[in-house]
Image: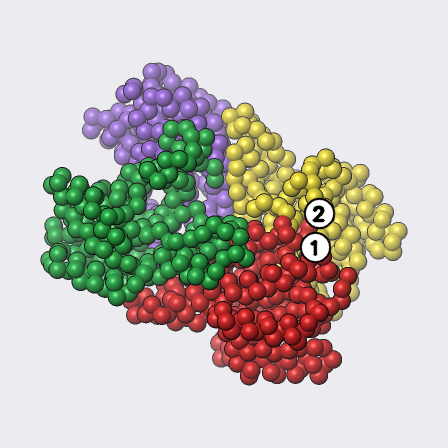
Chain colours: A red, B green, C purple, D yellow
Amino acid sequence: MSSKLFAVVAGAGSGTGRAVALRFAKAYPVVLLARKPGSYQDTVSEINQAGGRAVGISTDVTDGESIGLAFDSIKKELPDFKLAAAVYNVASGYLIKPFLELKPEDLDDSLSGSARGLFNFAQKTITLLLDAVPESKYPPTLLITGATSSLRGSAKFGTLAAGMFARRALAQSLAREFHPQGVHIAHSIIDGIIDIPRTAGHTANGGVEDSKLKPEGIAESYWYLHTQPRSTFTQELDLRPYVEKF
Amino acid sequence: MSSKLFAVVAGAGSGTGRAVALRFAKAYPVVLLARKPGSYQDTVSEINQAGGRAVGISTDVTDGESIGLAFDSIKKELPDFKLAAAVYNVASGYLIKPFLELKPEDLDDSLSGSARGLFNFAQKTITLLLDAVPESKYPPTLLITGATSSLRGSAKFGTLAAGMFARRALAQSLAREFHPQGVHIAHSIIDGIIDIPRTAGHTANGGVEDSKLKPEGIAESYWYLHTQPRSTFTQELDLRPYVEKF
Amino acid sequence: MSSKLFAVVAGAGSGTGRAVALRFAKAYPVVLLARKPGSYQDTVSEINQAGGRAVGISTDVTDGESIGLAFDSIKKELPDFKLAAAVYNVASGYLIKPFLELKPEDLDDSLSGSARGLFNFAQKTITLLLDAVPESKYPPTLLITGATSSLRGSAKFGTLAAGMFARRALAQSLAREFHPQGVHIAHSIIDGIIDIPRTAGHTANGGVEDSKLKPEGIAESYWYLHTQPRSTFTQELDLRPYVEKF
Amino acid sequence: MSSKLFAVVAGAGSGTGRAVALRFAKAYPVVLLARKPGSYQDTVSEINQAGGRAVGISTDVTDGESIGLAFDSIKKELPDFKLAAAVYNVASGYLIKPFLELKPEDLDDSLSGSARGLFNFAQKTITLLLDAVPESKYPPTLLITGATSSLRGSAKFGTLAAGMFARRALAQSLAREFHPQGVHIAHSIIDGIIDIPRTAGHTANGGVEDSKLKPEGIAESYWYLHTQPRSTFTQELDLRPYVEKF
């Protein structure tokens, strides 16, 4: 078995993306993708200073050319490495608005980040993951972040739900196509508010302790999914705080 | 109650669209929308010759400007009419292909017909349906055609499923927003092959009689949904031939 | 085609059961089943006085012997009639209680009315429905009443949900077995409070008009399902008031 | 934090039950429950000889009195221990048969093992799990084994599905009631054939390697679920071999 494996995280700038990068960096060199360097620089530094290996690349995954350049860079940075794990954690843009006030661009923004970006990322990574099947300790894995809105369309959240339903459809279709080829594709329904600096003001669930999802807990779940043997693949699970209503 | 009500069917060129137009024409003047006149001309003639009233308009519902012009024409054609029922029956373009052979445009084609077109059509029609609430005998209704792929992403059908999941998310979100305002929004899962000239060669389910969905049966279902009183709205139902595996 | 067809409604004492009996009595002689004569007598009289034909039989559908006797009586009352439609509308007993305060009998009560009763009723009626396939105008139909709890297990509603999930599992399994044999089996998710004298005190959804399900609307839906041709069977639909949160 | 914690596995005689017992025995003394001593003796010996601690108790979990005696025995065997994890892995009896050939007892057998046994087991264990909340390293956990039939009623599998749907309803209801109290309740959909001696003759999925679920993989998943922190609880996941059609 080759020890030359790496992981790539798209949407590395968010709380979940950062935590997943840190978790996978314990095992692999990690490539962090985000639109702006400011989103990944601190995490890249933290990993490298701790003795791991991390590379940050600025890219817009919804843009075919941009993501093409990003994967060219990856090939240069890690020329002999195969891809063990890819994480799609890109948040889509969306507005919470009465439907009749929305513009077509609002739907496009959601579909773009939720579905088009995953489409591009999956095309780039699945080719690499298939190539790693014979050599990876764990079945090569594509992990996809979902949300409450992946399962439920709500008033004023229609464009968000449209994008997240579409993302889930892709995740499920890819699992059905690539599981038999040895690439594991899992979709996680993140149901609740994530505990990050930006959400400090949200007092979810009465504000009791642990009432928001810890990014580290999500990251541990992603790592567990990655380590599942091919005889027992999970395609979908949910994650929510113990006090979350559902 | 005003007797001046009309219905509009987008995607009127298909077997289902034609049958729905014929069924609703028994009660209302009907506007048929399709990209090409050849798709609706025969049905328009048939309705008008039988003593009903039908108007055909060429439009691309995925194009905001085009659909805007179509609804301008509708206003001129039926100046004093209010909208009792709108049907979104547009088929999305999609390819059945291994995922790695698809191009980003293939995903866009599916999202465009399945979600963007519905978004445009819903924005145009819901405004009109809301306006008809006080006057319509039956609660004004937006009926949306779904498919097996609305609930299930399959290998090689990923782009189709992405679009149809997104369409269902919109349908559900719109129902949650507009039911309380008196506009009924229902989504029908059409599960099976529709019995139209184009599918004559498909021997579904062993080729036994009635093994494909009759467009008239679907149309009758849409009419029933339209007539539901607001105390008992259906948001989703499935329709399939008795011999269809599911 | 024989005109000698009849319908049978189990759980005829409730608001829905009574309304369904009245609706089907417009087309068929109707047998009303309930545990106590007081539950069906008024409806039977009403139908007979209006020129229809109705028979009431006291039975406990959860008891194999009792339901056997009931169907013996039906055969004597309507010796040359075939069964066009059967409706299972029996409410299960259940308690809304913290789980640790429940007794095993509480679970049994729910399973009994929700699943065991349907099992008994389906065994009796499907045999008769199959026999009517060649002669019934509409495909012979078994209609089954579900609820919000058919799809969702809630805190303190665990025993109710256990029974209603089990009922839905039977409905789905029976549909998959008997649809290809020409018997239509549909399950309706009734989501909301039904507008009957017993619920007069409930001010659902702010108490606005039509905020509860009208039994007549449910009955009309059951009649529509019964009339679906075999090329377009619905297996499941939902019904809820326009203002109901979902 | 107390180190005096234990685990209990009901249905310890199956491949999954045995594997779960072995996995949890790495961390806790384990009590194995099965109807017959022959079902757990080997596993109990194996754990004890390896330096762990295991106790086997014969009980019928569907019988309230029998399970009461079993938990009395547990209290005597492990007087100062608190319950960290409980696993309900009892298989229900069921027959694959045309519906009209089934007897009411066949439904009862399925409901009994699937729902009544879980009800009894949950009442005994949740009380103990709540008591362990302040002291357990990981949130005390009740893990419940589901199957393909938990989500889908199939022709000839109606009684199995009725029981497994009911089990899932209980699992979901318990999660909604007890998660906020700190007890984690998860349900795993095991979708495929489990690789145990009894299934050696089944050539699932073309008989390729790893085409059945390894009990050890399922056990590892259960262990992972047990270790989830309360900020990120999974309520449901699926597990299937990479080549399984779904």
**Residues marked 1 and 2 touching at CB (< 8 Å):** yes
Chain letter of the residue carrying label 1 = A
Q: Which mark is residue B204?
A: none
Position of residue D177 measured from the top left corner of the image (x, y, whole percent)? 54, 58
* Residue at the image point whose x is 68% and y is 79% from the top: A47
Quarter of the N terminus of chain C within the rendering? top left
Position of residue A15 measured from the top left corner of the image (x, y, whole percent)? 57, 75
- Name the residue that disc number 1 marks: A229
- Specify whether residue C157 is in view: no
Position of residue C164 measured from the top left corner of the image (x, y, whole percent)? 48, 43
* Residue at the image point whose x is 73% and y is 55% from the top: D7
Three-letter amino acid code at the position of disc 2: Asp
> What is the secondary structure assignment of the residue under circle 2?
loop
Chain letter of the residue carrying label 2 = D
* Residue at the image point whose x is 55% and y is 78% from the top: A58
Local crowd size for mark 2, using a 10 Å CA cut-off: few (<14), some (14–19), many (≥20): some
User: Quick one: B13 or C193, which is closer to the camera?
Assistant: B13
User: Quick one: C232 or B112, which is closer to the camera?
Assistant: B112
User: Quick one: D47 or A1, which is closer to the camera?
Assistant: A1
Establish whether labels 1 and 2 are both on one chain.
no
Above/below status of A76 relative to C169: below
* Residue at the image point whose x is 36% and y is 21% from the top: C134
> What is the secondary structure assignment of the residue under circle 1?
loop
- Name the residue that disc number 2 marks: D210
Local crowd size for mark 1, using a 10 Å CA cut-off: few (<14), some (14–19), many (≥20): many
Three-letter amino acid code at the position of disc 1: Pro
Along the horizontal axis of the image, is C77 left or right of A82?
left
Along the horizontal axis of the image, is D98 left or right of D36?
left
- Specify whether residue C169 is in view: yes
Position of residue C145 measured from the top left corner of the image (x, y, whole percent)? 40, 40
